[in-house]
Image (cartoon, rainbow, N blue to C red):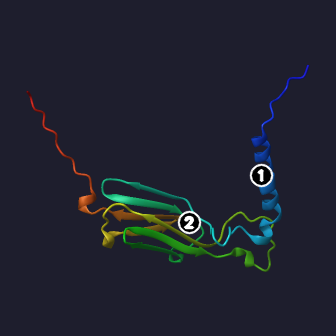
Amino acid sequence: MDSMVRWNPMKDLSNLRHSINRIFDENLSPMIGRTGTMDNPWTFPVDIHENEDNIIVRAEIPGLEKDEIKVHFVNNQLSIQGERANEQKKEDARFLKIERSYGSFYRSFNIDFPIKEDAITANYKNGMLEITLPKKEGAKPKRIPVDVSVH
C-alpha cells in the first residue's frame, strides 16, 4: 500500500520561481548583463563595527582602482560611490555567462556618533575599502566607578 504525501503548494511555487530565475539567468543574462534595473543598481556588502575610539566601515568593492571610489562624510552621513566599467564591450570576445555586476554604485549610512571629521581615513587594498571614523571625546564611553557603601 502506498503512503499518502501531503501536497505543499508553497514548495511547488518555490520550485517554479527557481526554475524561472534559472531560465532568465541562463538565457537573458548574456544579452542584458547583470546590471539590475535602472532603479536598483548593483550593491556591495558592508560591515560596520565600533570599538572604544572608532567606527570602522569595511566594504567589499573588488575590481576597481582607488581613484574610482569616492567617499564623503557630510552631516553625519557617510557615502560611498563610484562606477565599475562594463567589460562586455570587448569586441574580440563573446561572453557566455555574466555574473559580475557593473555600473554605478552608491551606499550611504547615518553615523550616530560625533566624529572627528578631519581625522577620517580611507584605505583600499585587495578589493576591500576600510574607512575609519574616529569618535570625538564626548562620544567615547566613560567608565564611572561605583562605590560600595555599607549600611
Mark sitting on residue 61? 2
Residue at 41 percent across and 54 percent down: it is 49
Nearest the camera: 91 or 98? Answer: 98
The relative height of residue 115 versus residue 12 in the rendered view (above or below) is below
Q: Secondary structure at mark 2?
A: loop
Please provide percent x and percent y for residue 45: 55, 59
- For the image, the number of numbered tags is 2
Q: Amino acid at mark 1?
A: Arg
Q: Secondary structure at mark 1?
A: helix
Residue at 38 percent across and 69 percent down: it is 121
- Left or right of residue 35, residue 114 in this image: left
Please provide percent x and percent y for residue 119: 32, 70
Please provide percent x and percent y for residue 44: 57, 63
**Quadrant assignment, res 126:** bottom right
- Left or right of residue 67, residue 150 in this image: left
Q: Amino acid at mark 2?
A: Ile
